[in-house]
Amino acid sequence: MKNFQEKISEVVIRRLTDYLRCLNYVKQEGKTLIKSSNISTKCGLKSSIIRKDLARFGVYGIKGKGYDIDELIKQIGKILGLDKTKNVVLIGAGNLGTAIIKYPRIKNANFNFIAAFDNNSDKIGKMINDTQIYSIDKINKFIKKNKIEIVLLTVPVSETMKIVDSLDSKFVKGILNFTSVILPPKKNNIFIHNIDLAKELEVLSYCMKKCTL
Amino acid sequence: MKNFQEKISEVVIRRLTDYLRCLNYVKQEGKTLIKSSNISTKCGLKSSIIRKDLARFGVYGIKGKGYDIDELIKQIGKILGLDKTKNVVLIGAGNLGTAIIKYPRIKNANFNFIAAFDNNSDKIGKMINDTQIYSIDKINKFIKKNKIEIVLLTVPVSETMKIVDSLDSKFVKGILNFTSVILPPKKNNIFIHNIDLAKELEVLSYCMKKCTL
DNA sequence: TAGATTGTTAATCGATTAACAATC
DNA sequence: TAGATTGTTAATCGATTAACAATC
């Protein structure tokens, strides 16, 4: 794999995750080689951009044959940083938080929920799958002890800012924010990605409308 | 507003939803005018692209002053098709489905969950907020009667394909798919948007990694 | 009028595509 | 070797930006 300094845009990374999903699917069918044109059909992209994306990271196939599926999965995983298990914690063990912990694909992607936090005393001490719920007071102690870099935020709007500002940025490097509060892309040197469920509904709505114009 | 035939890309629409969120926020503060440079700071974009996006839809401001906030909210809402309340139904009243119905911003965006469907007899007949849960057997009858165009899908992986294929495409025009199953962007003439929670975690993970290279 | 911010242009930048020589 | 698919180029396409004349 190339030791790239080149700037890679987020769209490329998003495509890479699509390739990975496609590859895992095809692997299950028992195949060992895959053509770029095959990934192309499954992902709804042109085959040339797939070859280009891969070559950009120094990932190559076999001319006349295609790509080795296992090798490709391994390489893309490495690019995305999925080769090592990452411990993450969840703050807010409500419906959304519970759903995320149970979300099937997250475990496959090598993310491990080692703890959840909530301020509801009825929930503290309980489990969601294999993940225990702790009091939110313990959050920074836990983060420090376990060197947690990624936090998923699924708390009510009213709690969001307070919690974000309280997180120890010596350890936390990324927040996935599912609350309706729009946070800046970077704060206290922590990367923040906002996921806005309403936005997706708005975009879908527009796409449907555009079609009938 | 311009009667555009021009092709608008999805990135523009996503920005528009950001503007809308920003505008609603600023409106609460009691302001009536907003400068593009102001939206720009809040959304992390260049001011020129904001003016360009708006002008593309024939939405104009006042030179030397800025944009009228109320007018802008109205116009963007119209572009996105949020001016009329849209009835939507949810299939799968588990944790994720429940969380989505309770998601605060969705109501503001003029989407109305008029029903939820599930196959668990313990849930059927119960309510989530103001939304009643019905047996999934009744889904197509309900869709037909209420002319439902948008379906949110939060069912287990194993159920997904069966349900998608069963939906009456004479009425349903869009599916927001939260399951881990990746569906094609269009099927039976229904627009499908996939929301993959694991993907977002992968992308965040890469962004963090890139930064420390 | 003077000051400010828009609307629009032209330049730049980056991403996608088609095509084909290279080669398994 | 013949057939197939890659890796890469050059062309195209579209999106972003800086700059400034227009004008409230």
Image: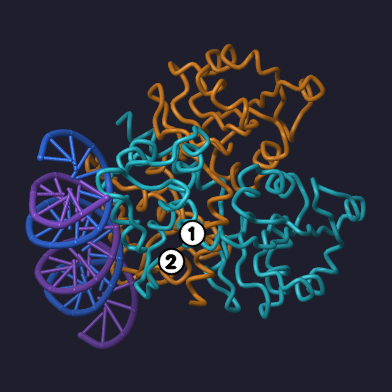
Chain colours: A orange, B cyan, C blue, D purple
Question: Considering the image in quadrants, where does the N terminus of chain A appear?
Answer: top left
The image shows residue B179 at horizontal and vertical percentages of 64, 55
The image shows residue D23 at horizontal and vertical percentages of 20, 54
Q: Is residue B125 left or right of residue A84?
A: right
**Circles 2 and 1: CB atoms closer than 8 Å:** yes
Residue B185, above or below D2: above
Residue C24, above or below A175: below
Residue indicated by mark 1: A23
Residue type at mark 2? Ile
Residue A201, above or below A109: below
Residue B158 in sight in this render: yes
Disc 2 to disc 1, how far (Cα)? 8 Å
Task: Say which of A66 and C17 sits in front.
Answer: C17
Dot 1: few (<14), some (14–19), or many (≥20) neighbours within 10 Å?
A: many
Q: Is residue B107 left or right of residue A166?
A: right
Residue in the image at 62% along x and 27% along y: A158
- Residue A80 placement: quadrant: top left
Q: Chain of mark 2?
A: A
Residue in the image at 59% along x and 52% along y: B109
Dot 2: few (<14), some (14–19), or many (≥20) neighbours within 10 Å?
A: many
The image shows residue D13 at horizontal and vertical percentages of 24, 71
Please tell me which of labels 2 and 1 falls first in the chain: 1
Task: Say which of A45 and B194 sits in front.
Answer: B194
Residue B199 got which mark?
none
Residue in the image at 78% along x and 25% along y: A123
Q: Is residue A123 left or right of residue D17?
A: right
Residue type at mark 1? Leu
Q: Secondary structure at mark 2?
A: helix
The image shows residue B170 at horizontal and vertical percentages of 67, 80
Residue indicated by mark 2: A39
Task: Say which of A144 and B99 sits in front.
Answer: B99
Q: Secondary structure at mark 1?
A: helix
